[in-house]
Amino acid sequence: MHRRGHRKSRNGCVECKRRHVKCDETHPTCIQCNTAQLRCMYASGWNSGPPQSSASPRASSQNGSSITSTVEPRSPNNIQPRIPDPPILNAHFSVTGSADDHFTVNLLHLQLFNHFTTETANTIMLDPRDSQKSMDVTMKAALSAPYLMQEILALSALHLSVLYPAQREFYHHQASALQTRALTIFNNSHLDVNAENCIPIAIFSSLLAMHSLCDVVSGPNDDFSNFLNSFIHCLDLHRGIRAIASHSWRILRQSELQHVVEAGEALNRTDNLVGKECDELRALLGSADIGHASMTACETAIDHLQRTFDMERLSDGRDNTFAIWPVLVPTEYMDLVIKRSPEALVVLAHFAVVLHSHRREWFIREGGGYLISSISRHLGSYWDNWMAWPNSVLGSSNPSQLPRSLPQSPLPAG
C-alpha cells in the first residue's frame, strides 16, 4: 500500500524537532511529548509538561496534592521551622542539557532556588545573625555569574537530599549534575580575578567547599585513607578562597563582603588567646622530636585553632566561623597532613572537635566524630595520650568504641 506523505511541521515543539519526529502542534502539550512523558516547549514560549500520569502513592493519597507532610529540622539556633515536603517532580524536570544551556530553567530550578533563599542560606552563612545582608550580596552576585547560580541550586538540592531521605537519591543526583555544570561554566570562563568578579568567585569557592564537605561526611567512608584524602581535598577547596582573597583583599575589604573579611581577620589574629583547649596539645608538641619547619607549621595551625575555639565560645556556637580555619592554616601544615604526620593528624583531630560541636548542621553531621575516631585508630595506642581530649569529647577514650562509619541519618541526635 502506498504510504501517504506528510507535510513537515514548521511550528512544532522543540522536543519533536530534536527527536526528528512529526509534531501535531497540539497545545499546550503535543501528542508525541504526552506519550513519551517529555516536557513540551514551543519556540513561542514555554508550555506545560505532560499531565501527572499514574501519580505516586504519596501524591494520590493526598487527593492530588504533591505536598504531603511537614518536618521540623533543627537549626543551630534551636529554631524549628516547619518545612513542607517538596513536590515529587517528574523525571523530565531533572537537570539535562549541556553547560551552555545555563539560562534554561524549569520547575525543579524554581523549587531549588526557593528552598535556598528560604532555608539553605540561613544554615550556611558565616554569621546567621547577619544572614539577610549575606543573602542580598549572594543573590546580587549570582545574577551576574551563572556558575554561582548553578552552585546555589546544587547546594540547595544537596540540602534537600539530607532533609528528605526518601528522595535522597533523586536530589543527590541533581546536586551532582548541577555542581558539574557550575564547574564547567566556571572553568570555561577562564576568569582573571578583578574588581568585577572577585565577589561572585569568592562566594562560589565558599559554597563549593561547603558542598564538598557535605559530600565527604555523607559517606560511605569505611576506608580511612580514602576519607582523609577526600577531607584534605575539601580543605584545599577552602584554602582556595585564600588564594582568591590574596589577589583582591583590598577590594573585598571595601566591598559588600566586608563583614566576612573582618571575621576572617579576627580569626587570623593570634594575640590575646584566652582559651585553654589547646594548652595540652601545645605542651605535647613542644616535647616532640620533629624538625623546626614542621614544628612551626603545627604551632601556627594550633594558634589559629585556639582562636577558633575562642570565637566559638563568644558566639555560643551560633556562627560558622570554624570554616575559616582551613583557610588560615599554612601550606606546610597541610603537607604534613598529606604525609600522615602523627602530630599534624592530632591537630586535625582537635579541629574535628569543633566540627563535632556543630554536628546538628546538615552539612557536617557525624563527620567530626568519625574523623576523630578514624585518626585514633590510625595512630594506635602509642598516641592515646595525644588523643585523650578529642576522644573524651566523644564520651570515650577507647577508639574501638567510637563510630567506624558515618551514619546516614540526616539529623543526628545528641
Image (spheres, rainbow, N blue to C red):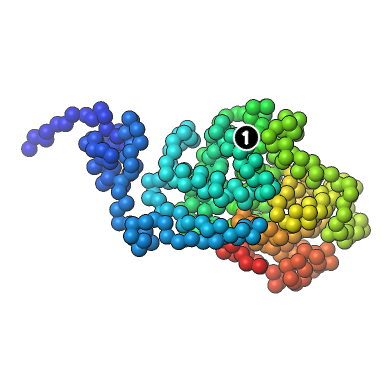
Question: Mark 1 belongs to which amino acid?
Answer: Pro
Q: Position of residue 341 (x, y in %)?
A: 79, 54
The quarter in which the C terminus is drawn is: bottom right
Query: Where is mark 1, residue-wise?
Result: 200
Along the line of sight, the residue nearer the viewer: 53 or 7: 53
Q: Is residue 320 left or right of residue 410?
A: right
Residue at the limit of the structure toward the left, as seen here: 1
- Residue in the picture at 69% in, 40% down: 240
Q: Give the residue at x 33% y 42%.
A: 48
- The residue shown at (61%, 58%) is 79
Q: Is residue 244 above or below residue 310?
A: above
Task: Write the residue at 14% across / 31% down.
Answer: 5
| Quadrant where the N terminus is found in the figure | top left
Q: Is residue 296 left or right of residue 52?
A: right
**132 is higher (above) or lower (below) than 22:** below
Q: Position of residue 175 (x, y in %)?
A: 52, 48
267 shown above or below 24: below
The number of numbered badges drawn on the structure is: 1
Q: Quadrant location of residue 32?
A: top left
Is 111 on the left or on the right of 79, as rendered? left
Sort mark 1 into few (<14), some (14-19) or many (20+) by Cα contacts within 10 Å.
many
Query: Is residue 3 in sight in this rendering?
Result: yes
Instruction: Name the residue nearer the viewer: 111 or 333.
Output: 111
Image coords of residue 254 (percent x, y): 73, 31
Q: Left or right: 26 with respect to 272?
A: left
In this rendering, does residue 348 appear at all? no
Residue furthest out toward the right: 287
The x, y position of residue 294, in whole percent, is: 85, 49
Q: Secondary structure at mark 1?
A: helix
Question: Which of the 4 image quarters holds residue 280?
Answer: bottom right
Q: Where is 102 relative to 74, above or below?
A: above
